Image (tube, helix red, strand yellow):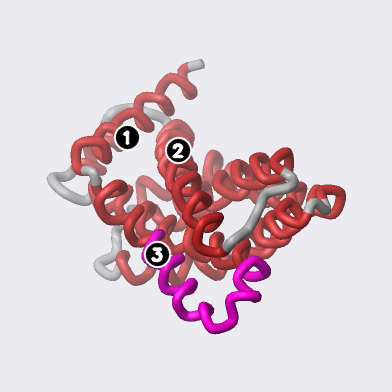
Amino acid sequence: MTILSDALAVAGKDLRIEARSRVTLGQILPFGVLVLLLFAFALDPQSRLLPNVAPGLFWIAVLLAAVLAVSRSFAVESEHGARDALRLSGIDGASVFLGKAGAIVLELLALEVVLLIGTFGLYNVNVRGLEVLIPTAVAATCGIAATGTVYGILAAGLRVRETLVPLLVLPVTAPVLLGATRAFDDALTGSTGDAWPWVQLLVVFAAVYVTAGIVAFESLLEEA
């Protein structure tokens, strides 16, 4: 229970910082919406394609916004020696990982709700498989957050971390983009039976990176 309580404390700390700074609301959310708008304008002459490409464009927007959220999460702790204070606090590395990843998950889920509403309005799509849509979003978001947290701490101690995080995170999350896009597409068309193998892929991906983060984050935090 100590690990969970410490993880909740770390997550609460990150969420309180974001609530006070309003970076997620004032910068990351508008960025995600802007990505959807740009794609909508770019594909407007071929508006019949919009419903077909909506799942992929939605998850591209989520991934790009996630990179900003991860960079923000670790940039905050690089100021005023906050990361050193976190190391000296005695909190286990696994708790720090779970807390930071959990905070990113909550931020991204809130972002996805807004982006999904925007996708429905801009791309003229309807949901026929909500029972697939929700677990897909949760599994994919957990995978993205876990991956971003692992690679975010790898780049945290480097001067080029702002540009290195996207280079590390985006290629690794390609299976999430593929699986989430296919599952969303099946959910929108009502082919829910075809979506569950992709959901299972997302769950496996998330489990692998959550496990890796729990095991390795302590040493990664010490090296950062």
Give the residue displayed 76% in from the left and 57% down from the top: 189
Tag 3 secondary structure: helix
- Residues at circles 3 and 1 in contact by the CB criterion of under 8 Å: no
Question: Residue 100 vs residue 116: left or right?
Answer: left
Amino acid on which disc 2 is placed: Leu
Q: Position of residue 130 (x, y in %)?
A: 69, 41
**Magenta span:** 33-53
Counting from the top left corner in percent of width and height, residue 2 is at: 46, 18
Residue furthest toward the bottom? 45
Q: Which mark is residue 15?
A: 1
Q: Quadrant of residue 11?
A: top left
Q: What's the magenta bit mostly, secondary-structure-wise?
A: helix
* Residue ID at (22%, 51%): 78
Instruction: Name the residue: 51% across, 16% down.
Output: 1
Q: Which residue is mark 3?
A: 165
**Relative to the observer, which residue lies in front, 192 or 16?**
192
Residue 24 in sight here? yes
> Badge 2: how crowded within 10 Å, few (<14), some, or many (20+)?
some
Amino acid type for the residue under numbered disc 3: Val
Residue shown at 17% from the left, 44% from the top: 81
**Residue 67 appears at what percent x and percent y?**
41, 60
Membership of 162 in magenta stretch: no
Q: Nearer the viewer, mark 3 or mark 2?
A: 2
State the image coordinates of residue 197 (x, y, percent, origin top left): 82, 52
The answer to whether residue 207 shows anywhere in this view is: no
- The reply to whether the C-beta atoms of the residues labelled 1 and 2 are less than 8 Å apart is yes
Q: Disc 1 versus disc 2: distance between alpha carbons?
A: 9 Å
- Dot 3 or dot 1, earlier in sequence: 1
